Every structure is written in C-alpha cells, then in structure tokens.
Image (cartoon, rainbow, N blue to C red):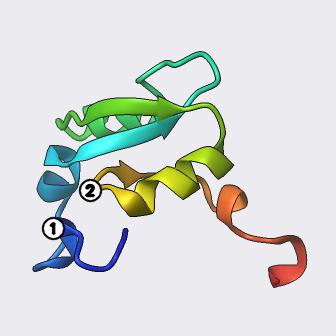
Amino acid sequence: MRPGHPLTEGPLSLERYAAAEHLTVSRRGRLRDPVDDALATLGHERRVVAAGPTAAFALQLAPATDLVLTLPDAAVTFPGGR
C-alpha cells in the first residue's frame, strides 16, 4: 500500500481488508481469484473493482490508487533474496 493509504490508519483487520476496493491480476480480466475463495471460507467477501493483465502492471497501478493488491510472495521477491 502507498503511504497515506486509508488502511494504514489503525490496525489492519480481516474486515477492513475485505471492505477495501481491490485490484487483481488476470490476463482474461477475471475479477475472482484464490484469495476470494480463501475469504469465503472465513465468511468474508471482497470487492474487486479492476484487473491488471500482469503483476508488473498491477504493481505500477496500485501505488497511484487506494486499491489493494494482493500477490503471492513469488511475484514480489527476487531469486536469491535480492
């Protein structure tokens, strides 16, 4: 999240996370992914309002918005810990 994002104010709870507007990654423009399935098992639902075609695209877009982007570790870490 970018500095000043509304979710940085106060503790981050599952409820606040789910209530935020989300950005996901999908080459086909799908707005549902495994995160939604995991949230559903916990009784929560998020609102995905946009999909970027690649993680790189979404990582460029997210800091300019209040959208929350959830990615697997592999999408944001470099091999060898660099």
Check disc 2 and give the amino acid type: Asp
Q: Quadrant of the C terminus?
A: bottom right
| Residue pictured at 21% horizontal, 33% vertical | 45
Which residue is most to the front?
64
Where residue 16 sits in the image (x, y, percent)? Answer: 13, 57
Which element is circle 1 on? helix
Q: Compare residues 75 and 60 and report the one nearer the observer.
A: 60
Marks 1 and 2 close (CB-CB < 8 Å): yes
The disc at residue 20 is none
Query: In front: 74, or 66?
Result: 66
Instruction: Identify the image quadrant of the N terminus.
Output: bottom left
Question: Outermost residue toward the right?
Answer: 80
Which mark sits nearer the N-terminus, 1 or 2?
1
Q: Is residue 21 left or right of residue 72?
A: left
Residue 55: image x %, image y %?
63, 46
Q: How crowded is the residue under tag 2: few (<14 C-alpha within 10 Å), some, or many (20+)?
A: some
Spatial distance from mark 1 to mark 2, Cα to Cα? 7 Å
> Could you tell whether 59 is left or right of 36 in the image?
right
Q: Secondary structure at mark 2?
A: loop
Q: Is residue 10 left or right of residue 76?
A: left
> Which residue lies at the image location 54% right of the left edge and 47% below the top edge?
58
**Residue 23 position by quadrant:** top left
Q: Which mark is residue 66?
A: 2
Q: Which residue is labeled 1 in the image?
A: 6
